[in-house]
Amino acid sequence: MNPPKSPTNRHALSVLVENNPGVLARVSVLFARRNFNIDHLVVGPTEDAKVSRMTIVVNVSAEQLHKVTSQLDKLVEVIHIEELADADVIRDQLWEINDNGPRPVGAMAAAAF
């Protein structure tokens, strides 16, 4: 069993990408090829309908982060990558958004699965 990773290795990335089919798949495959797990991922539109923002929280070393961001930067659809200041705070905020969202109930919940 692997020991839990240190929270000091938690990094949050804000990635602007072209809003094209398959971009999310290419980004997630890039992480999977390097055997990195994405802890949290949120994708949403920006003011420009042609651009989406991915907020990605990963638990990797600084060296591994540099390697994966270098690879991300090579993807044609990636416009800009920025590491956000406090990954734990961002992760908690994303978790709150996820927890406070609408939940299906009754027959709708059964149909959702």
Image (spheres, rainbow, N blue to C red):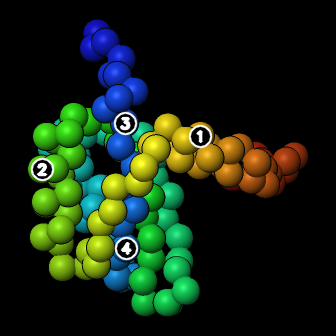
Q: Left of 109 or right of it: where is 33?
A: left
Look at 40% across and 62% down and name the residue there.
Answer: 14
Q: Amino acid at mark 1?
A: Asp
Look at 20% across and 39% down and name the residue there.
Answer: 62
User: Mark 3 vs mark 1: which is more N-terminal?
Assistant: 3
User: Mark 2 vs mark 3: which is more N-terminal?
Assistant: 3
Q: CA distance from mark 2 to mark 3?
A: 15 Å
Q: Left of 30 or right of it: where is 82?
A: right
Q: Nearer the viewer, residue 34 or 46?
A: 46
Q: Amino acid at mark 4?
A: Leu
Q: How many marks?
A: 4
- Residue 98, above or below 54: above
Image position, residue 110 (x, y; %): 76, 46
Q: Mark 1 — residue?
A: 92
Q: Mark 2 — residue?
A: 67
Q: Which mark is residue 16?
A: 4
Q: Amino acid at mark 3?
A: Arg
Mark 2 Cα-neighbour bin, 10 Å: few <14, some 14–19, many ≥20: few
